[in-house]
Image (cartoon, rainbow, N blue to C red):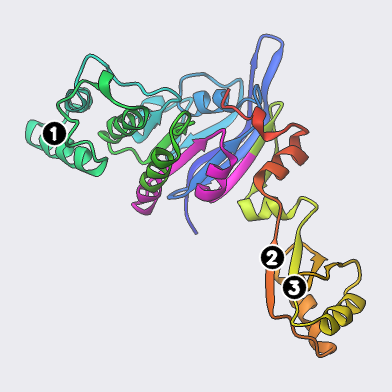
Amino acid sequence: MRSSAIAVSGLRKAFGDKVVLDGIDLDVRAGTVYSLLGPNGAGKTTTVNVLTTLVKADGGTVRVAGHDIATEPKAVRAAIGVTGQFAAVDELLTGQENLQLMVDLHRVGTGEGRRVITELLERFDLVEAAQKLASTYSGGMRRKLDLAMTLVGNPRIIFLDEPTTGLDPRSRRTMWDIIRELVAGGTTIFLTTQYLEEADHLADRVAVLDQGRLVAEGTPSDLKRQVPGSHVRLRFADVRELDAAARVLAGSTRDDEELILRVPGDGGTSSLRALLQQLDAHSLNAEELSVHTPDLNDVFLALTGRPSTEVTAK
């Protein structure tokens, strides 16, 4: 079992009379992507600010990379990297100069620094743009440079706050590939995003924060199975088989034109096994079987009462 990269218990934070975080618990396993979702004002950015030592908590305990953020903030900062919602690059410097700045700040030796810069430029496909001012970079190139700068310190945990906001679909997919590569190499990613599809594709686990409280947590598949609308779709060879299956499987709905029967269910292995046993007991055979579950948009609406278009990382 993976160790905890981030362990949060009873985290509380208030600004004046407004309670922003009301006792939340998180357990982020090392080498995974953990995505925090929530509507505007839910407390996501406050959570990130507390975990990265930018804001002090009012209560609870938080350990990041094994260090207590209250008593060992320097050790926490040494282990993490933060890429904010807006690319923090110096537009008056070239791409290479931005990386050199980070090398100098991390006090990396001259020879090692040159090697790190060369590797990062190649890894993020920025070699041809290395000598150009960052002000001339596209949005996607700036985001890649920003993340490359974060990696200079070789952080074990990276906080990504809306890393693909404003990017075109191609640049977004490139960032997804980079994130997957980082995780494959053992890096832990704490991700906030306004794109539920992004969380669905990337996250090993997802937490939904609403009004300062965690209202759900689990794998994307787990969360989608909790929302009504999950069903198993069976396609039969002929109407006779469809008729027989419809009589056996209570609560199912049929599509005579497509010879399809939709059977309500959570899509889990137990319910699938029971369904197949029912078919087998009546000598029925479906030509195709597929499980259909609600997407994270449906989950978000069901849990928060708000459409996913309101999701931001505030």
The amino acid on which the numbered mark 3 sits, given as a three-letter code, is: Leu
Sequence-wise, the earlier of marks 2 and 1 is: 1
The percent position of residue 79, horizontal first and vertical second, equals 35, 35
Q: Judge left or right: residue 177 versus residue 240.
A: left
Q: Amino acid at mark 2?
A: Val
Q: Residue furthest front?
A: 257
* x, y percent for residue 261: 80, 70
Q: Which span of residues is magenta-colored?
A: 179-207
Q: Position of residue 252 (x, y in %)?
A: 87, 67
Which class describes the residues within 10 Å of circle 1: few (<14), some (14-19), or many (20+)? some
2 or 3: tag closer to the N-terminus: 3
**Which disc number belongs to residue 113?**
1
C-alpha span from label 2 to label 1: 50 Å
Residue pointed to by mark 2: 291
Gap in angstroms between the C-alphas marked 3 and 1: 58 Å
Say whether disc 3 or disc 1 marks the residue closer to the N-terminus: 1
The residue shown at (67%, 34%) is 308
The quarter of the picture where residue 160 lies is top left
Amino acid at pointer 1 = Gly
Question: On the image, numbered disc 3 is attached to which residue?
Answer: 234
Relative height, residue 137 to residue 66 (above, below): above
